[in-house]
Image (cartoon, helix red, strand yellow):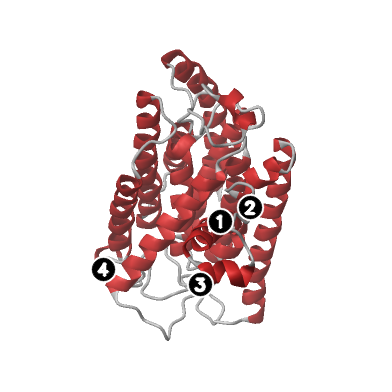
Amino acid sequence: MRAILFGGGLSLLISLLGTRYAIRLLSRRGYGQEIRDDGPTTHHTKRGTPTMGGIVIILAALVGYGAAKVITGQAPTASALLLLFLFLGLGLVGFLDDFIKISRQRSLGLRSRAKIIGQTVVAVVFGWLALSPALEDERGWRPATHHISFIRDYERLVLPTVVVVLLIWLIVTGTSNAVNLSDGLDGLATGASILVFAAYTLVNIWQNSQSCALQAGPKCYEVRDPLDLAVVSAAITGACFGFLWWNASPAQIFMGDTGSLALGGAMAGFAIMTRTELLLLVIGGLFVLITLSVMVQVSVFKASRASGLFRSVFRVKPGHRVFRMTPLHHHFEMLGWEQVTIVIRFWIVTGLCVAVGIGMFYAEWVAGVG
């Protein structure tokens, strides 16, 4: 437990102080954010705000975790190292995207295909290692399993390794892109991420206290290295807290794709390793809603232009849009909501999703459903 406190506290301090230094350094080098011309006009005032602040979040979390391990004299576990690999790997993909935007002075970085390739390589390597027999502990547990899970593994359904790796790829790319879509207002993605990672800190602590390694029973959890995963989630939570001090409206720095892809990848990693893949849809409900808004907007727009039957059934014109603008937070901007109001209300929605998710997690344990 000391490692959790050290990891979270040190990461917060490093991020809080390091972000201030990063703002000065990135400003001097001219690493400013490019703004979409088709986005809300109120965002044009943000052009030139330092970006790639996700570097600070990543470094603060890595250093905070490492320092916590050194202080407590504990060795890193395979699960924690794999999670950090996913966190850092997707952060590097995001860094390339941000760097291209800055160096070429445009709002688009990596091509969609190149970004997907980068995410795929990181996700597949992570999935393959997480399922590797070489990472089994003395109980035969691996960081990931061949089962689908909600709160626990569905033991009756055993999937082939190839299928599991594909599912891991889908979860990792989907979640990282969802957080990326959410990073459109000052402090929105950062604050929401804090709540989600705090939830996974609690989940990991509880799974450690009720681990089958301590006492076998119908309610115990067969999760490898839950306590060390809690240290990682606490470190990421602390790093986001420190960054939010400077990212809150009016933001003095943006996390960029460097931070959003890394945070999304870490969320996916926690869901996979804690055997709560489907529960992530509840805990990360805000990110799901924002992603769905984009999917619905694009689908309806294309269908209304291509299909006369669709237009006649739903009585819409060609090029119909469900929302004024997507992702979802921009829709509310176009309705006249203040950015701060949107962010705070979306944080509240995230808090409700986290509360429901944690409630479901605990209720399952109380009911003894295994």
Q: Classify mark 4: helix, strand or loop.
A: helix
Of labels 2 and 3, the one closer to you = 2
Compared to residue 117, the image places residue 207 above or below, namely below
Amino acid found under the numbered disc labelled 1: Gln
Q: Nearer the viewer, residue 119 or 34?
A: 34
Disc ID at residue 221: 3
Disc 1 crowd rating (10 Å Cα; few below 14, some 14-19, many 20+) is some
Kindly check if marks 2 and 3 are in contact, taking CB atoms under 8 A apart as contact: no
Report the residue marked by disc 1: 297
Kindly check if marks 1 and 2 are in contact, taking CB atoms under 8 A apart as contact: yes
Q: Residue at x 55, y 61 (%)?
A: 300
Residue 45 placed where, x, y %?
Answer: 60, 23
First-in-chain label (1 vs 2): 1
Report the residue marked by disc 4: 133
Q: Classify mark 3: helix, strand or loop.
A: loop
Compared across the picture, whether 331 is left or right of 113 comes to right
Compared to residue 254, the image places residue 117 above or below, namely below
- The residue furthest bottom is 156
Disc ID at residue 323: 2
First-in-chain label (4 vs 2): 4
Distance from label 1 to label 3 (Cα)?
Answer: 40 Å
First-in-chain label (2 vs 3): 3
Q: Classify mark 2: helix, strand or loop.
A: loop
